[in-house]
Amino acid sequence: MKPRHASDEHRLSRLVNIGLPYLWLGLFFLLPFVIVLRISLAEPQLAQPPYTALWEWVEQGILQIRLNLGNFQLIREDDIYLAALLNSLWVALMGTLGCLLLGYPMAYAIATAPERRRIPLLMLIILPFWTSFLIRVYAWIGLLNANGLLNNFLLQLGVIDTPLKILHTQTAVYIGVIYSYLPFMILPLYANLTRLDPTLLEAAADLGCRPFRAFTRVTLPLSMPGIVAGSMLVFIPVVGEFVIPDLLGSPGSLMIGKLMWTEFFANKDWPLASALAIVLLAVLVVPFVLMQRLQQNDEDGRT
Amino acid sequence: MKRRSWPLLSVLAFGYAFLYVPILLLILYSFNESRLVTVWSGFSFKWYGELLHNRQLLDAAWLSVRIAAVNATIALVLGTLAANALVRHGRFRGRTGLELLLTAPLVMPDVIIGLSMLLLFVALQQTIGWPDGRGFSTITIAHITFSLAYVAVVVRSRLARMDASLEEAAMDLGARPLTVYRRITLPLIAPALLSGWLLAFTLSLDDLVIASFVSGPGSTTLPMVIYSSVRMGVSPQINALATLVVAVVALAVVIAGFSLRRR
């Protein structure tokens, strides 16, 4: 190989480091959305592939374009889609609040633990995340069943006389969401809380501020970036969640991710599924931009 | 030592119980003799035996492991490159775009990624004839696309925290950038590379939704088999399988922990 200058190598490394990930993500992440948008404007047909082409040359020099807005019209007019969308947002909101209520004290307790205990405690939070998500959701079926372990336990204790119906209700979905997404809330909160300057709290204490008040006036506002980051990491994916509502939820209350799945796999309506994906994306753009903005600020603040 | 507050510690304990009790019960009941998952009728290994004779499940597991390994390896390379770009190349043009493309897959709902990847593959097949049919390669490509974003997060934070003086010293002694990267940087970020690889591996092994969209006939992954059996109801075989998965993961984490500690 012929010798190269360091600056050549630098240029090459720049090209590879920036170019290859860009190329991959552009081709396999960005381009697909353009195609989803295209197919959301097509009509379903019984053929391979099961949607109509948007344009075709009918004769020399005449390009015929057919855009079908019917899918979006259907989504707007049929109440089931709006109800599913609102329910998804509601479940995501409740799930996020639940994760925050449980996750914040946990993250706080870990961040204020003696230093040598922090990493093991954190590992214990991450460990379940490494085992199968599907299996962890499945575990709750056996727990929440009418004749499941929780009901048997409560019956034996005499707390209840008839089994509670929890499985296949909205409550089960909340439990599943909090259970599955808790680590996503705790990790950014922990990272944020350990970065806080402890001298601020000492200053507050020296000035006669009680611990609880110091928490609400100093710690809580300063940990806002962690709260928002964790909340977005939970909220955004939960809006489109499929597995949890499908296995734990009631068949009656629909979520948008499950509806997309049904339109695609059961009804084989690819254009309608695509239109739903576009609607879901449009809804998620706002929280996503918020998250991205915050992350950017956070980094700018650090450098 | 500062007195810890009781309410805080009890929330912590409740949180850990909440995270671990379902998994522990799952493991316990995999040794249950009865078919009824909720009634204990005696200790038995019989569900593990049945698991070993479940051809469909074993095939699916083997396919999933192969996909996960290829996925983790390619995602590791691409994710590390992306991390290099963001940490080492400062404010290049398109930096915000790359950040966006690396954050979006972390939160994007699986149903959207799955559907959009499938539509891409169908469109590609129509226009350039590739991929011819769907299966191993399409699932792997789809998995790499979101795994590489996770790898980038892990490697990036390690690179950013790394002590740059060793690299500068090597540079001053006349080593070329590529040599410095290979001899100094890579060994220093090795723990992050290992956890990035493992993370990508488990993410792929775990994915049901995306694989369901982009798989073809004859390529059923392990989560797809688990899902169809879970839909039929609770089954002790799945408990046994879950126990094995947990055992493998715990083992991998322990090994990784030890090998990192020895460094």
Image (cartoon, helix red, strand yellow):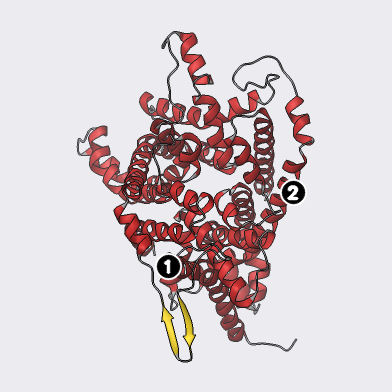
The image quarter containing residue B184 is: bottom right
Secondary structure at badge 1 equals helix
For label 1, the residue is A37
Say left or right for B149 vs A205.
right
Q: Residue at the location (36% across, 56% down)?
A: A284
Q: Residue furthest bottom?
A: A61
Say left or right for A268 vs B39.
left
Query: Residue B61: x percent and y percent?
Result: 71, 46
Q: Amino acid at mark 2?
A: Trp
Q: Residue at the location (38% across, 68% down)?
A: A68
Secondary structure at badge 2 equals helix
Q: Residue at the location (39% across, 28% down)?
A: B4
For label 2, the residue is B62
Closer to us: A143 or A302: A143
Q: Is residue B49 visible?
A: yes
Closer to us: B190 or B101: B101
Graded by Cα atoms within 10 Å as few (under 14), some (14 to 19) or many (20 or more), the crowding at tag 2 reads: few
The image shows residue B42, relative to residue B121, as above or below, that is above
The image shows residue B207, relative to residue A37, as above or below, that is above
Q: Chain of mark 2?
A: B
